Image (spheres, helix red, strand yellow):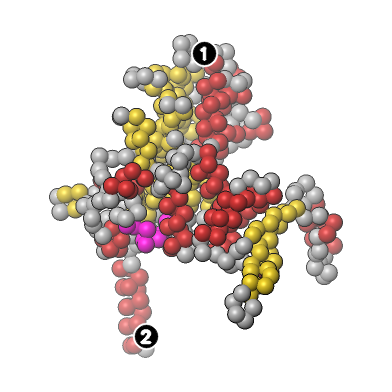
Amino acid sequence: MLIQFSVGNFRSFKERATLSMVAANTNARDPLINKNNTIIVNDDLTLLTSTAIYGANASGKSNIVRALAFMCQLVLSSAKESQAGEPLGAEPFRLSTETENEPSFFEVVFLIDSIQYRYGFEVNYKQVISEWLFSVPSIKEATLFVREADAIKPSPKFFKEGKGLEGKTRSNALFLSVVAQFNGEISTSILKWFRRIGIVSGLDDTSYRAYTIKQVIDGKYKDEIIQLVKSLDIDINDIEGMKVDKSQVQLPPGMPEDIRLIFLKSIQDKELLTVQTKHPKLNAKGEPVGSVVFDMDANESHGTQKAFYLAGPILDVLSRGKVLIIDEMEARLHPLVTRELIQLFNSIETNPKRAQLIFTTHDTNLLSNKLFRRDQIWFVEKDSFCASHLYSLAEIKIDDGRVRNDASYEDDYLKGRYGAIPFLGGIKKIMAEGSKDNAEE
């Protein structure tokens, strides 16, 4: 389970920002929301099942997702030989002389088998500057290893698996990843935890098309996928995934030979998949008399396609208690469909393994005390130096007091009481001046 994620000096985040999945000392108006939207780990720790992140365009919402994706990618690929000599590609906050040449900071706190870990690193474009791993096996935090550049110090008591591997770690490789390559027990379990984080772009959900189709073909979650798609008020009776014979691929007759050869070469080592949906055919009396087969990509709406493509990752995460991050979740989905997908996580009945969902959105219909606790709603806002800041609704003070749990979150947000909204005054001024100039001409 994810406890918190911190990032600093990365893209639009100049100062360190922390997204916490720890339930704050607050309660929802409806006791059922407290029960369904929280995960009681022990007497001292309660986590949240979901978190929504709001903010204006270009405020930095997506950079939270990019930061976590960067951390996951580096951890999972760092020790590979193919990465030798390759730049790490960290992007510092470039709008300040204080930070443009400083390393980017990443840290995550999480649980594996009831043991809490804190792992992080600082990297610049070329190399690892520092790295650390701590655990809390009981009450006091224990140091597993610390690293400053190439000086790596694994604990002989708590991280024996790292002994002797210090010299095998490149300057652009993470020590944790190297130890996992040598089958270290703790490091391997941590890499497995990172693999359990799914990151999805709501704007490019087609990249998960093949994953969901394979689940349908293999029979894994097929019934659940059909039920999920149908539950979103989509008139589909059945879904069939199938592999496409490459010899049957038809190309436009007028396609130039060089382009045709490039295309055929590009699909040579790929598995081509397609998916079809079945809809009921009705007579004049509205009685079913058969079915009609549609091609998902050619005949279904973008909303139906997205609901199907997301079904695979969502069901996998729910069934295995993993973490799912979706950027721009509401894109091409009806607000009620988006709400229904979120409710899958905010329910003990549909989320018994207590999976977690983090998503960015502009959909203010979701800003409701009937859906979220105050600590589940987060905002990203840029300051006058164009640096992003992250804060939760539970932290905001209005009229010398906290936001009430019966407040109208959507109305207050749109009125600017919580910040993190677009500033449109400049546009109005420009338009007004333009109208004045046109009138004078």
In this orientation, does residue 94 appear?
Answer: no
Return the residue nearer the eye: 279 or 175: 279
Coordinates of residue 316 in the picture (x, y in percent) = 56, 44
Q: CA distance from mark 1 to mark 2?
A: 76 Å
Residue 170, numbered circle: none
Return the residue nearer the eye: 261 or 236: 236
Residue 160, numbered circle: 1
In this orientation, does residue 411 appear?
Answer: yes
**Crowding near the residue tagged with mark 2, few <14, some 14–19, many ≥20 C-alpha atoms within 10 Å:** few
**Crowding near the residue tagged with mark 1, few <14, some 14–19, many ≥20 C-alpha atoms within 10 Å:** some
Residue type highlighted by circle 1 = Lys
Helix, strand or loop at mark 2: helix
Residue 419 lies left or right of residue 160; in this view the side is left
The magenta region covers 360-368
Return the residue nearer the eye: 182 or 113: 113
Query: Which residue is pictured at 80% across the width and 64% down the height?
Result: 251
Question: Of label 1 and label 2, which has the lower sequence position?
Answer: 1
